[in-house]
Every structure is written in structure tokens, then in C-alpha cells.
Amino acid sequence: MQGALKVVNAIDGLLPIIHSSAGCSIHSKLSNSTLTGNNGAHFSGWLETPSTSVIEKEIVFGGSSRLREQIKNTIKIQSADLYVVISGCAPEIVGDDVSAMVKEAQEQDFPVINVSAPGFKGNVFKGYQLAVKSLIERILAHELTYKTEENRVNLLGIIPEQDIFWEGNLESLKALLTCIGLNANTLLGYNQNEENWNVVPLAGLNIVFSIWGLEAAQQLEKKIGTPYLYIGYLPTGATDTSAFLDAVGAKTGISTEVIEKVKSDNEKYQYYQFQKLAQCYHTLDLQKEIILVGESHNILGIARFLQNSFGQLIKAVIVTDNPAEEYRDQIKDLLPVNDFYPIQLIFTVDGKEIDEYIYDLKPELILGSSLEQPIAHELSVPLIKVSAPAFDKVIVDSSYTGYKGALALLQEFSNAFQSAF
Amino acid sequence: MSILRQKASPIREKRLFAIGAYYGKAEILLSEYEENEQFTQRVRTFSQDSQSDILTALNVISTIKDAAVIVHGAAGCGVGRLSLVPNDENNTKWAVTNLNERDSIMGSGSKLQEAILQIYKLHEPKLIFIVLAPIVSINNDDIESVVEELKGELETTIIPVYSVGFRSKIGSTGLDLVSHSILKRFFKINTEVVPSDYVNLLTVAEKKSDVTEATRLLNELGLKINLFPRYTSYENIKQVSNASFSISVNPDDSIYPGEVLKERFDIPYIQSVIPIGIDNTSQWITDIAIATDRKKKAHELLTLEKEKLFTLVRKKDNIKPKIFISLTPAYGIAVIKLVEELGYEIVGYKFSFLDNQHLSFVKQIKDEKPDIPVFVGNGQYFEEENVIRKIKPELYIGSNNSDFTVAVRNGIPVINIDNFSIFGFNGVINFANKITKTLANTSFVKSLASSEAESDTYKTEWLRKSTNWFIKQEVK
């Protein structure tokens, strides 16, 4: 449910209506939103999520009429482009016919859809996929013929809040693609509304930044033939960002001249900053043995940049989003390689195991989530928060993605050792 | 000990006739009470999400030392526990059983057993709390047999907390659950009571700085304090049965553990007001002093403490904002009194629930402020927006559980009472200072509210309707 809520709450004009017992969205706001950079509210409000908040009577005798009444009244008092009924554990187990209630509303020409997302069906990534799938299905159901806009691309696979820098990352990628003449649909976050989703089928290309965006990309390829480019991580730094632009260029027919100019300008800038760092890199002893913890798509780019361009020695990359077996080889291939300092790739969702690995490997710095704070404290090493959850952090729109993001990362990285003591 | 025989405390609707939905005249509420000897239950035909008993229970449990916590439910249910980690100074070990579809059909007993065994093996906690998510209750999974089986095997006290999520409309019901569950499982039938010289301070949902201040004041009276259930520890719980008195902090929440301790261990319970405000703090100290025979000490203490109040400058010409308060009832009633002590006026208030302990307050409203409606709701900010648009308050007082965006987007400055210690006379000073500072620069909320970019969250039709449009009497 929380995965679905993250999607709906990130689109202007979309209002969730929860059909479940009380508390689901409160849990979500108090942790998912607060603990990932203190994401606040926008269209759908902070603690104002419509909910049937079913009680015992409605569980025993069914909650369908409560849902019908709730949908009707929500539409009465709040305008929205789309009302998304998200059902949770209680009504799903007792078998409330949510689809029937939603269909009723649709027949009265109200824009309502439902997403079945009880907690026992899956985790946050599954919820994200379910919500995105439902939204796309709804658009494709109109069965229009789409005139492809070659320079329009959709950005898929970045999950609000789960990626704590999601807003900044989406804006960063959009700005980058604008530089080479592409119109990037971020779909989530600032200024994104139903209109942006309606033009999803018009895109000439879908760019997929994580395995969780693949389902939507494949759905669009199958139904209307939109090609997709699977990147699988957020590119950080000149080398990977330039390679990213090349890959995008190849699939979209943007002139190499345009791309080369953007690449060279930015590569020059990174080189300029690296030169300035040449002295303090050595007086502050910035080569460290590090460990990264987080979702593959969020930490691979950082790992690659820090090792391939900044001389860092990576002891381990601990991947926590439990990707399916078929994707694990791909992730392994994306890992930066260093024959002199091999990287351990570990897949686990268990906090205790993560602590044990870190304890055994004794890194000098951890890039991870606040759940690594105790072990970082025990080992007396700095922790840079790059993954969810991130406690006591306010993130407005910073990003470690792209050319500029890499430099922000370097600043954060270098300062971690200065303020440690 | 009949009440502890149940696996859960009674819901507040049954025990105190608590209501979670009302907007209207105090007069009507009172006449209903007179007729039925209880408040009339109402429901909402449109509602917004609110805290369930799971979250309120977890909130208390997360402060308990020597404990491990297992959230028994799907993965997302554990996220509620996660929100409490940042303020957890005990670094409590916790786990979630990650129930999936198969477990829902086949039963969750084995996963629970495994979780308990693992967490015990790794950390050997003296207490293991099991907090249940709705999925377990709906499926009627057998928790007791798992607990029974492991009880003899492990040297720990396993405490299942029967938070159901949909039993009560009042989230605070979860607070009673914690005391109930601990007292039920921890003490054997033949527990020996060894009378002692300390007192139980029944903390439930208070913040640390407030508990510190309450403890300090009682220490000044010469009382030794044993905290329960909030901030308690294994040793504290052991001593709970031997206290000479139990003392309330928040009367709404302390009363359940207070009465259970009285019934179970014959410990006299001192119920008083919450020590917020000048009058209330004096009364709280006095009530306790009388019961524990320390009147002289109390007099000395009060004289000393009240000297702090001389720093309160009663500025005559400064701004007197019209205030709206949105809090839990004991806090709300006390803060209303406090702002009036400081010379301000309230134009409205909302309590998250109301029960028969608040009758005298409702009567007071009817007599002294009959035009201010009684407003009851947990969350339900759509109703707050409706009220705020109509009465246009100039200051909004809430807590960390509030949604401040409602006030802020309407350009109303906000005070969060969780940002400073509000108990005792120190709290009065802190509160007065906070009001002064907040009103000295309101540029943040003003710049937000004046922005043309935002459109209204709610339709005008709603804002024009009567606030209780979606509140109906419950059909039995």
C-alpha cells in the first residue's frame, strides 16, 4: 500500500482513497515521508488522506457500502483529476468487492480507479509497480492512436521517497536531457499531473532507471511498441553520465554534435574541479575503504563513480531491494571492477546480516541508511545517508545524479571526515 | 482479577463511553448524556485516516528498556515502528514477521515462533513484545499457543499486545493495551507484594522533557519515582507491584493502569489534573501532597516554583491573538486554561476524543462559552479547515501528531507544544516565550499563504457547509 501511496501522492491532481482499517497512511507519512528527507505534503495533503477507516462491524458485515459512501463524499468535497481507491489488508481478506464500487462510480462518469495493494501481497516496490501499471492501463484503455513525439521521453523506475533524493534526481535528469534537446516526462513530483501521464504513450523512448520500472516499460512496448532503454541505475559523474547521454542519443537520433558539446563542457568542468581537489585529496587523505548499502539503482551509480573516478576502495556493495534472480547477474555486471581490490556483492534484506557484514569488513566510511547508524557508531566511522530511511534529514532537492550531482557527492564525501570528530 | 483475565483492555468506547465524532453545541451533547447516561456514538460518512491503536501502542512500547519488539504482520506494518526509531535511546531490537499471502491463508504461527526464537537467541531481551497487525486478527491466528509453547523454554517474558486496528475508533485505546498486556503477562497469580517507599508515576504518552520535569517536582516533594509504562524498564516493572501509591500524569491515560494496579495490587491511585498551567500544576502537586502526607513540603515547593512566574511580563499592549487549539483532551483542556491564565482568548478547539471524564469541561463550556462548539475528531482535518475558514483564528496550537499544513496554508502561525517542555511552572514560562517568539516573525506562514500558486484543497461547497455535515448518529 505504501508503494502505491508514494506514486499517487507524487502526482498533482491525484487523490488516494484508502479502503482499510485506520492508520495505514499515517504510518506511511510518519515514516516513509518523514524518514526520507522530511518529504512534506502537496496536493493530497499531509494527514488528510481520505480513508474508510473500517471498524469491526464493516469487517464482519462487509465494507462495500462504507466504501461507496466514502467515494461519493470524497468526490463531493475534493476536486481531483483522478481518485485512486487503494485497498488494504482488512477488506481484501474479507473479500469486499472494491472493483464493483469503483465501477459504480465510473458508470456515473467519475474518474475513479482502484489499486489492490494489501500489505501481504508484497512490499513497497510491488506497490509502486501496481500503481504505475494501473495508471498506464487506464491511459491505454482509451485506445487512441498515438502520434509519437520523437524528442519526448518518459523517466521510469525512480520511486518517490524510497529514493531519498528522488525530487532532485528527477529534476537533474530532466535538465540533463533538456540540454540535448529532449523533453523528459518525470511523471512524479513537481508540476506533474494527469496530463503528463496522458502523454506517456506519445514518447519516443522510455528510459528505465531501476528494475522496478521494467514492468511499465515492457507494458508500453508490448501494447504500443514504445522502445525502452534499460539503464538500471542513476548515472553519477562525467564518465557514466556521458555514457548515458551516448546511449540515449543512439536510441533517439539526437545529433552526436549536440551530445558531444554537452559532454565536453561538463567533462571539462569536472576536470576543473578535480584539479582543485588534487591537493586536499592528499592532505585530507581522501582515499578510503568504503561500503555502500541500499537499493541497487540508488547506489550503483555512486559506487561506480567513487571507484572509477575518485580512487575509492570499495569493500562491499550491499543490495537491499531483493531483486529477482534474473536481475542479479545484470547488477553484478554493473558493479565497478578492480582486480586489485575486489568488491563483494551482497544481497540481503536483513538488518542484522548487514550489520554483521559491515562489522567484519571494518570500512572507514559507510554510505547507507540511518539503520546503519548504530554500526557506524560502534566502528566510529562516518555515515553518509544515501538510502532510505534517513532520519533527521531535510532533503529539499539535492541530488548526486549526473554531472553536477557527482560534485555535490564529492563535497559531502570529503566533509564526512572533517566533521566526524 | 477479572479485568486482566481478558487478553485486551476494554475499548474506550465501552469503558469510558468515549466518542470520536461530534461538532455542535455543548448543550446538545449534555442533554444526550443526561438521557442515555453516556455520550451518543456518531460515525463519519466521510473520513480521513487517523492513528490506530497499533501506532499508539507501539509509541509506548518503543520507550521501554530491556525489550525487543516483534511486529506481527506484513512488511509495511513494521514501518510504523520505524518512525519511532529516531527517538529511541534504548536502540531497541525489533523485527517484523513479513507475512505474505501464503501465511495469510496457511497461518502465521510458525513465522511468529521463529521470530521470537531468533530475537531471543540474538539478544536475550528480558521482555519480548508482540504487536499484532490487523491481518492476524482477521485471520484469527492463534497467538496464545505459540506464546504458551515458548513460555517455559525461554527466560524472558513474552507479551502479546492485542492491537486489532479496527476494534475501536479511538486510537488512544492502544495506550491502555500496553499497560494491560504487561500487567497480565508479567505477574504470576501469587506475586508477593513487598510494600516500599516509592511511587509509580503513570507515564503513557508524554515527551521526555515533560516526564523529567514531573519527576523533578515530585523528587522535590521527597518522593522516589518508578515510571510505568512509558520509559519503564524490566526492573521498574518488577517494582510496580510494590509501590505505595500510583500517581496520574495525564488523567485520560493514567486512569487505566491506575485502576488496574489498584484492583490487582491494592495500590491507591491518585488521579489529578495534568500539570500544565499555573493552576493545574499547583493542584497536581497539592493533590499528591495531600495523599502522601507532604503538605508542608508542597507549600515550600510551590512558593519557590511560583517565583519563576515573576519573569512573566504581562505586556499590556502586545498582540492578543485569537487561538485555536487541536490536541488530545487532557492537554487541550489544560492548554485552554493556560492560555486564559496568560490573558489570551480561544475562539475554538478540537479534541481527538471525548469521554465521561470530560463532563465537567463540557458543562463549563455550556455555561461560560456556549457559542464555542464542542469539536471532537481524530485527524479529520477537512473539518478543521472548514472551522478555521469560518472563525479565522490567529494562532494554532497543536502537537507532533497534528497536521500543521492546514493552519500554514491559511496563513495562521503555529505553536507545536512538543517543541518545548510544557509541564510545571517552567512549562508556563516556556509556553509564554514561545508565543511571543512565534508572533514576532510570522513570515514563513505568511509567505506561503500569500502565494497565488496554490488552489484550495477543498471545494468551496464543503467550506460553506456546516462542519458536522458528515457526522451522523450511529445506526445500531
Image: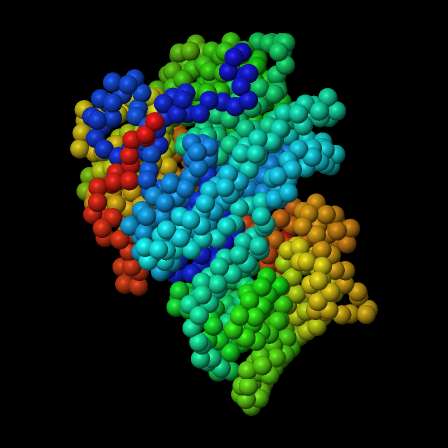
Q: Residue furthest bottom?
A: A257
Which residue sits at x=51%, y=61%? A133
Camera-side residue of B64 and B345: B64
Q: Quadrant of residue B96?
A: top right
Q: Find residue A318 and report its horizontal and vertical position in percent.
A: 70, 57
**Residue A19 seen from this side:** yes
Measured as percent of width and height from the top left, residue B16 is found at 38, 21
Residue drawn 49% across the image and 22% down it: B9
Task: Pick whichever, A104 or A56, lies toward us.
Answer: A104
**Residue B148, quarter of the rendered image:** top right
- Image position of B202 with respect to B372: above or below: above
Measured from the top left, where is residue B234 in percent x and y?
63, 25
The number of numbered badges drawn on the structure is 0
Nearer the observer, A326 or A94: A94
Answer with left or right where residue B439 lies relative to residue A371. Answer: left
Q: Coloring scheme of the render?
A: rainbow
**Please, which residue is most extreme toward the right here?**
A340
Q: Is A148 drawn above or below residue B471 in the view shown? A: below
Image-based side of A166 in relation to A277, left or right:
left
Q: Can you tell which quarter of the image residue B40 is in?
A: top left
> Which residue is at 68% across, 58% downward?
A324
Q: Is residue B243 above or below residue B313?
A: above
Q: Residue at x 57, y 76 (%)?
A: A227
Tell me, yes or no, if residue A288 can be seen here.
no
- Provide residue B138's location: percent of width, then percent of height: 53, 34
Does A210 appear above or below A206?
Answer: above
